Amino acid sequence: MDSGGVPEYSVIVTCFNEERTAAEFIGRLADTLRSIGRPAEIVVVDDGSADATFNVLLEVLHDEPLISVAIELYRNSGQAAAITAALQECRGRNIVLIDSDLQLDPEELPMLMEPYEQGLDIVSGYRRHRRDHWSRIIYSKLANAIMRKASRTNFRDFGCTFKIIRADAIRALSFGPTHVFSIVQVCAQLRRWAEVPVTHHPRRVGKSGWTLRKLLRLNTDNLLHLSRRPFEYLGLFTAIGALLLVLRIAIADWLPESLLPAVSTGLLLNAVIFGLLVTTTVQVVLGEIAMRSFELARRQPAYIVRQRVTRNPDSHD
């Protein structure tokens, strides 16, 4: 620790149904941190697991001095919520994110630290040879394309939870129970970044907590919160539809009568299609905005902490 008791790195480990992998992963992570020799702490979060994950974390907390806090959420609230809960406890100047499912190797952390300590704001791993089901890889490529547009960056792999980020940049965004962590929002604010290829293994046990529904909601949030492009596209579609109608009226005076019915019908049909597309898109976008405004007004937390256990017995909640 520095003179103020602040670690250089706070490592956030989120777990969901990881009772068979959490202890091994944290042990390997702790050994890596000790070999690096930087002042560090580990904050672990059980994201409402249905198995004995939190009991495993408590056992590891008892034996591993690098773990400063173990948190259990009442229910599975999603990885972003779990990261947010951990951020409230982190004291370090730099934040490390990494999954505990053993698909990523904590031993590769020095590979990210080397460019990061050259003065970058964020260094992210990217899974060059991803070992997931093909359907998830395809959707991930689409999601990454959306997130690149939303953040106006060129990150290849937003979904790789192996990252180092400046803590003050994260804290400036005031994440909390009603505004959960978003890597896209963070990346949109940072200029100095790099990506490092990392090893990716097949999942040993269980399955990912990311469902298609959660991924769709995440990307809808990204588009609505960080980009004006959906509204720009709406304006473009509206302009095209209007142009087709204008052409329909204009050509009626000079187009030969033999061609007028076919051309006129085609333009009118296209204008109707664009009109329906614009109307449907407007309804979807406005509906999403209305729902998020309603949720924001209610101030409902995205997660609730059930237990918080620290190495200091006086801080056991």
Image: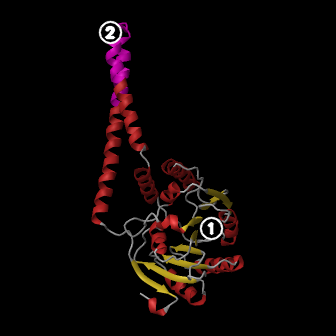
Can residue 20 be seen at all in this image of the molecule?
no
Give me the residue at 62% from left, 77% from top: 25
Query: Which label's residue is closer to the chain start, 2 or 1?
Result: 1
Secondary element at image label 1: loop
User: Which is the main secondary structure of the residues drawn in magenta?
Assistant: helix
Determine whether, in the image, residue 128 is placed left or right of residue 291: right
Point out residue 280 in the picture as x, y percentages from the top left corner.
33, 41
- Mark 2 surroundings: few (<14), some (14-19) or many (≥20) residues within 10 A: few
Pointer 2: what residue? 253
Q: Which residues are magenta?
A: 244-272
Give me the residue at 37% from left, 24% from top: 243
Amino acid type of the residue that numbered disc 1 sits on in the rendered structure: Gln
Amino acid type of the residue that numbered disc 2 sits on in the rendered structure: Asp
Numbered tag placed on residue 103 in the rendering: 1
The foreground one among 179 and 262 is 179
Residue 239 magenta: no
Mark 2 vs mark 1: in front = 2
Residue 259 magenta: yes
268 up-or-down from 146: above or below? above
The image quadrant of residue 198 is bottom right
